[in-house]
Image: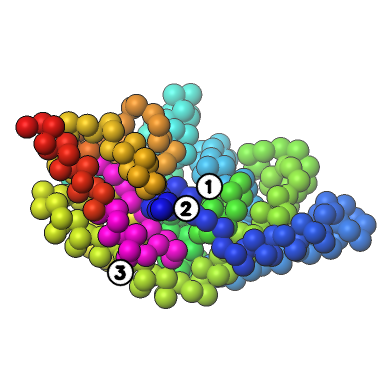
Amino acid sequence: MQIYLDNAATTALDPEVIAVMVDTMKNDFGNPSSIHGHGRRVKTIVEKARKTIAQLLHASPAEIFFTSGGTEADNMAIVRSIADFGITHAITSPLEHHAVLHTLEALEKEEKFTLNIVSVDEKGDINYAHLEELLANNPRTFVSLMHANNELGNLTDVGRVSEICARYDAIFHSDTVQTMGHYPHDLSKLKIDFITGSAHKFHGPKGVGFLYINARNKIKPLIYGGAQERNMRGGTENVYGIVGMAKALEIAYRDMEEHHLYIQGLKDYMIARLREAIPEVRFNGQIEADRSLYTVLNVSLPCSDMNDMLLFNLDIAGISASGGSACSSGSDIGSHVLRAIDADNDRPSVRFSFCKNNTKEEIDTVVAKVKEICDKEEKISL
């Protein structure tokens, strides 16, 4: 039996998404930049997808730019903002995805600006007072804070951050990759400059995403070439990916309330079952429903003699999970997120992340296997 509980890393394609992508592959192969009939037809398909995404987010189609995924979208927002807005200070948190942290750190080394790190508490929550203090000292700053942490699941109040940023004329970018398709985003009400999305996080295809750029902001391209994306991103559009992403987001919004309740139930069930089976279990980050992403649960286990073997043993048992951020899986440097909250290095941590396809029966199987591994390691240590 194979059990997949690594949905924060990537999700399975929805059958409806596969169907619309295959139909497009079969019937619409033209280049959307071509002026003949084949090209115009595909251009219409791309613009329809853009309109679908914009309507779901309460944005204008002119504010949606297609990219290769969340990493490119984050880089585009960060690099171009620093260059085009004359930014001399930037603020982020120690918990951000490397697409944000590494980009800002690289630019700081080039002496483009000064980078400040807002403090977080032991649960991984942002210190909003510290954020305001940093902005008060350096108005017109670039701020990048993610909506939900990809390892812990902690939710940041982007509405509150946006209001703070607005008071100090700051540019606010939020990596919303983990929450896109899982929470509603009403960009007509949110004072935000940039957000990002990646299709494969909400049952769409890999290799495609988007960047929302508020209409009041004018930036230059990150990738030069042709006139695609209204001269904002060179390169022939990933038509099939774009079609699939729009369909996936449409499905996500259509079924959002139902799936939210169902997946939150799975998460709550796993928390209860783990506490029952392993009394010494702890959880990294927030687990309260209103403060935590309902698709992510970061578990800290008491078994420690074979920490490095935990994920391997789960994998051997047919259970897919992660030791932290999926983009760092397999590396030996550990999780920068867990280090930032001073997680106990003597306890192995595993991130389980859920989707609409998981079941309580799978949770029971996983909890039983985790208990078996911990009991085995305890016997070895004795």
Which residue is drawn at the image coordinates 40% and 62% (left, top)? 358
Q: Secondary structure at mark 1?
A: helix
Residue 52 higher or lower than 78, as above or below: below
Image position of 132 (left or right of 220): left
Q: Sequence order check: which comes first, mark 1 or mark 3?
A: 1
Classify the position of the C terminus by image quarter: top left
The amino acid type of the residue labelled 1 equals: Gly
Residue at disc 2, secondary structure: loop
Question: In the depicted view, which residue is nearer to us: 283 or 105?
Answer: 283
Which residue sits at x=47%, y=66%? Answer: 185
Residue 196 x, y percent position in the rendering? 52, 52
Callout 3 secondary element? helix
From this viewpoint, which residue is outermost toward the right? 36
Between disc 1 and disc 3, the foreground one is: 3
Q: Which residue is mark 3?
A: 265
User: Does residue 4 show up magenta in the picture?
Assistant: no
Instruction: Tell me the kind of residue under disc 3.
Output: Gly
Q: CA distance from mark 1 to mark 3?
A: 28 Å
The residues bearing labels 3 and 2 have C-alpha atoms spaced at a distance of 22 Å
Q: Is residue 333 above or below residue 310?
A: above
Mark 1 — residue? 70
Separation of residues labelled 2 and 1 (CA atoms): 6 Å
The magenta-colored residue range is 349-367
Instruction: Count the labels in the image.
Output: 3
Residue 142 visible? The answer is yes
Residue 49 appearing in the image: no
The spot of residue 334 in percent (x, y) is 31, 31
Q: Nearer the viewer, residue 96 or 380?
A: 380
Q: Quadrant of residue 277?
A: bottom left
Q: Which residue is mark 2?
A: 177
In contact (CB < 8 Å): disc 2 and disc 1: yes
Decide which of 328, 35 is in the foreground and name it: 328
